[in-house]
Image (spheres, rainbow, N blue to C red):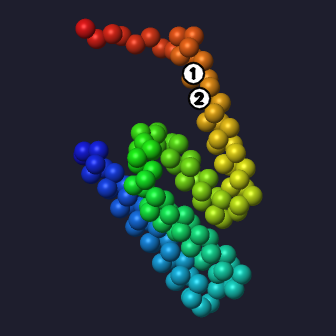
């Protein structure tokens, strides 16, 4: 699969996920037979996460210009988890975001020092 079609596929999955979460949140909000507090909590959580994913879908073309598609998948998943936590529980999301930023800076610094001291694994030169 080419890089452009892969990015289109990722944006489509992001849009479908956002729409599915928003629809599920709205359906749960009007379903009878559940406790009012739990219904409001679950519907609100699904709607918030759907909105966060929708904003990510809308911002994807601009973010692609910054080179986000070159990031490792684990970092993107971590970023989405932080955004979801921030949407559900802002205080926990703020702590998770701080840990993500601090950890990323730490590991970037470690990688920079390793490359500076040339302690990384030796790569064979192809001739």
Please tell me whether mark 2 sits on a helix, a strand or a loop: helix
Asked where in the image residue 100 lies, by quadrant, the reply is top right
Quadrant position of residue 125: top left
Q: Residue at x 48, y 78 (%)?
A: 23
Q: Is residue 19 visible?
A: yes
Q: Which mark is residue 76?
A: none
Nearest the eye: 4 or 82: 4
Whether residue 46 can be seen here: no
Image side of residue 53 versus residue 29, left or right: left
Return the residue nearer the eye: 25 or 100: 100
**Which quadrant, please, contains the C terminus?**
top left
Residue topped by disc 2: 108
* Residue 5 x/y as whole percent: 27, 51
The answer to whether the residues at label 2 and label 1 have Cβ atoms under 8 Å apart is: yes
| Image position of 121 with respect to 71: above or below | above
Task: Please indicate whether residue 112 sits to the left or right of residue 6 in the image.
Answer: right
Q: Circle 1 is placed at which residue position?
A: 112
Query: Spatial distance from mark 2 to mark 1, Cα to Cα?
Result: 6 Å
Residue at 61%, 23% in the rendered image = 110
Q: Secondary structure at mark 1?
A: helix
Q: Residue 15, percent across and down?
A: 41, 65
Residue 21 percent coordinates (x, y):
50, 71
Rate crowding at label 1 as few (under 14), some (14 to 19) or many (20 or more) other CA atoms within 10 Å: few
Q: Residues within 10 Å of mark 2 (few under 14, many from 20)?
A: few
Q: Which residue, as the protein is rendered here, is positioned at the far right?
A: 91
Residue visible at 28% across and 11% down in the picture: 126
How many dots with numbers?
2
């Amino acid at each position: 699969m080419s890089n452009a079609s892969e990015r289109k596929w990722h944006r489509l999955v992001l849009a479908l996920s956002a729409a599915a979460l928003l629809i599920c949140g709205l359906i749960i909000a009007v379903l009878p037979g559940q406790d009012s507090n739990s219904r409001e909590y679950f519907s609100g959580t699904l709607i918030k996460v759907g909105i966060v994913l929708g904003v990510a879908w809308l911002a994807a073309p601009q973010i692609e210009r910054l080179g986000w598609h070159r990031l490792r998948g684990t970092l993107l998943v971590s970023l989405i988890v932080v955004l979801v936590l921030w949407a559900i529980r802002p205080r926990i999301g703020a702590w998770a975001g701080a840990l993500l930023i601090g950890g990323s800076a730490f590991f970037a610094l470690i990688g920079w020092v390793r490359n500076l001291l040339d302690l990384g694994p030796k790569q064979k030169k192809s001739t």
